[in-house]
Image: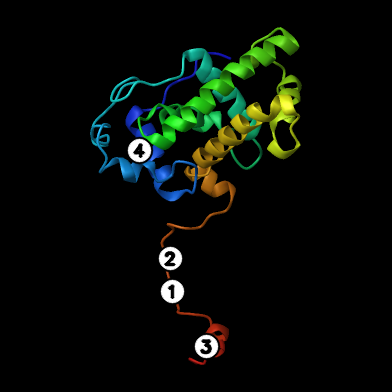
């Protein structure tokens, strides 16, 4: 995989905060709590322009970014309705998420970083290659063993919990983008050009007609 372009840092932070506010994910209350807690400093000023590593250091190495992008695309590949997760920079959203200093994100950080270490070791063990260099079929072979915690073998329970968290973050990032909304045919935030009132059958049912 060639070098991945980086998305605008301010946009990535804004994306992380928006996702935290609107989705029920582990740690989804942590940002709100952090605003009145001590020890974190202030939340990012989204009017500023941030470079990679500003405000709080980003956790992923370049190789880890590529691994995360590859795993995101196993979970949400491109199809005829939408681009792949990595095309929407979901890997940068995850990097921002696990790098934030808030309690929920720090908990996810350990899960994700440990899981990426396991993924690297397992890829080398099975196929003598890093995860990003595996064929799609080989990636799926590994992911099939960890994709469902209740059915994972005992040796794969911890990696399966990693995969569960990673999948949640991937889907949260993807489905809070305009492309993700379009994929699920979400029609919110679209102004109506004309509204003629409730349908007659609704008014009749409510005895308002």
| Spatial separation of the CA atoms under disc 1 and disc 3 | 19 Å
Q: Which mark is residue 206?
A: 3
Residue 83 picture quarter: top right
Sequence order check: which comes first, mark 4 or mark 2? 4
| Spatial separation of the CA atoms under disc 3 and disc 4 | 42 Å
- Determine the residue located farthest toward the top in the rendered image: 128
Residue at (60% x, 23% y) in the render: 70
Seen in the picture, residue 143 relative to 196 is either above or below; the reply is above
| Spatial separation of the CA atoms under disc 4 and disc 2 | 27 Å
- SS for tag 3? loop
| Spatial separation of the CA atoms under disc 2 and disc 1 | 7 Å
Q: Which residue is mark 2?
A: 192
Residue at (40% x, 37% y) in the render: 16
Residue 83 in sight here: no
**Residue 140, position in %: x, y?**
73, 26
Sequence order check: which comes first, mark 1 or mark 4? 4
Sort mark 2 into few (<14), some (14-19) or many (20+) by Cα contacts within 10 Å. Answer: few
Residue 69 picture quarter: top right
- SS for tag 4? helix
Q: Which residue is mark 4?
A: 14
**Residue 176, position in %: x, y?**
48, 44
Are the two marked residues, 2 and 1, in contact with CB atoms closer than 8 angstroms?
yes
- State the residue in front, 202 or 192: 202
Q: Which mark is residue 195?
A: 1
Closer mark to the observer between disc 4 and disc 2: 4
Sequence order check: which comes first, mark 3 or mark 2? 2
Residue at (53% x, 39% y) in the render: 174
Closer mark to the observer between disc 3 and disc 2: 3
């Amino acid at each position: 995989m060639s070098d991945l372009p980086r998305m605008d840092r301010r946009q990535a932070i804004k994306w992380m905060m928006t996702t935290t506010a609107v989705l029920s994910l582990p740690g989804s209350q942590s940002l709100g709590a952090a605003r009145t807690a001590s020890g974190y400093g202030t939340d990012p000023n989204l009017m500023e322009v941030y470079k990679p590593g500003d405000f709080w250091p980003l956790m992923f190495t370049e190789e880890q970014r590529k691994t995360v992008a590859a795993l995101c695309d196993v979970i949400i590949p491109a199809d005829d309705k939408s681009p792949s997760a990595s095309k929407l920079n979901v890997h940068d959203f995850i990097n921002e998420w696990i790098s934030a200093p808030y309690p929920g994100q720090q908990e996810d950080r350990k899960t994700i970083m440990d899981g990426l270490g396991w993924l690297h070791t397992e890829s080398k063990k099975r196929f003598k290659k890093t995860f990003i260099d595996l064929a799609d079929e080989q990636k799926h072979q590994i992911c099939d063993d960890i994709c469902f915690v209740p059915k994972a073998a005992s040796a794969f329970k911890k990696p399966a919990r990693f995969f569960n968290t990673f999948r949640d973050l991937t889907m949260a990032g993807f489905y809070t983008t305009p492309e993700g909304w379009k994929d699920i045919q979400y029609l919110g935030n679209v102004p109506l050009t004309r509204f003629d009132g409730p349908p007659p059958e609704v008014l009749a049912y409510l005895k308002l007609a």
